Image (spheres, rainbow, N blue to C red):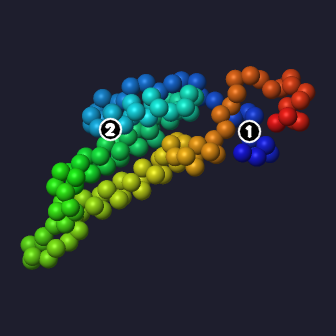
Amino acid sequence: MQKCRTNPHEPRPTTALCTPPEYMSDAAKEAWNYAVANSPPGLLSALDGAVLERWANCSGLYREALAKINRAGVSGMIIKTPSGILRRSPLMDVIRELAMEMKVYETEMGFTPAARSRISAPSDAPRDNDPWADIAG
């Protein structure tokens, strides 16, 4: 990140994320817990809960839809219409849409390698009194 674009006064939420909302499906809760457990320290806070909730719900639905296709094998990717025409299963469209939506949330939360490379985690040590900060970066 370019030094001129950093905000030294950026608010830093301090409240950590806790358990997922009770009304979420088991698959969504599993995704939530995985994200919280595997995110870099300080990346997610309680303020990010709504975005994480949307991602986890999409992830849970994605996994359920994909599991249904996987159980049926290649034949699950194709359906026969009432007129006898073979078509792609609507579940394939659902899977694609969920993956696209998840990617938006993943980028916002730094869950992809490219998104993480753009994140600069603030250090805990104050740099206001460091005379070398401007020179050493």
Rendered-image quadrant of the C terminus: top right
Reply above or below: 133 against 125: below
Q: Residue furthest front?
A: 73
Q: Which residue is mark 2?
A: 28
Along the line of sight, the residue nearer the viewer: 29 or 63? 63
Residue at 47%, 32% in the rendered image? 38
Q: Is residue 29 left or right of residue 12?
A: left
Does residue 97 appear in this view?
Answer: yes
Q: Amino acid at mark 1?
A: Asn
The circle on residue 7 is: 1
Image location of residue 40, percent across then percent down: 55, 31
Along the line of sight, the residue nearer the viewer: 61 or 53? 61
Reply above or below: 26 against 69: above
Rendered-image quadrant of the N terminus: top right
Reply above or below: 56 against 81: above
Reply above or below: 6 against 36: below
Label 1: few (<14), some (14–19) or many (≥20) C-alpha neighbours in 10 Å: few
Residue at disc 2, secondary structure: helix
Q: Is residue 124 left or right of residue 40?
A: right
Residue at 30%, 58% in the rendered image? 94
Instruction: Name the N-terminal-most of marks 2 and 1.
Output: 1
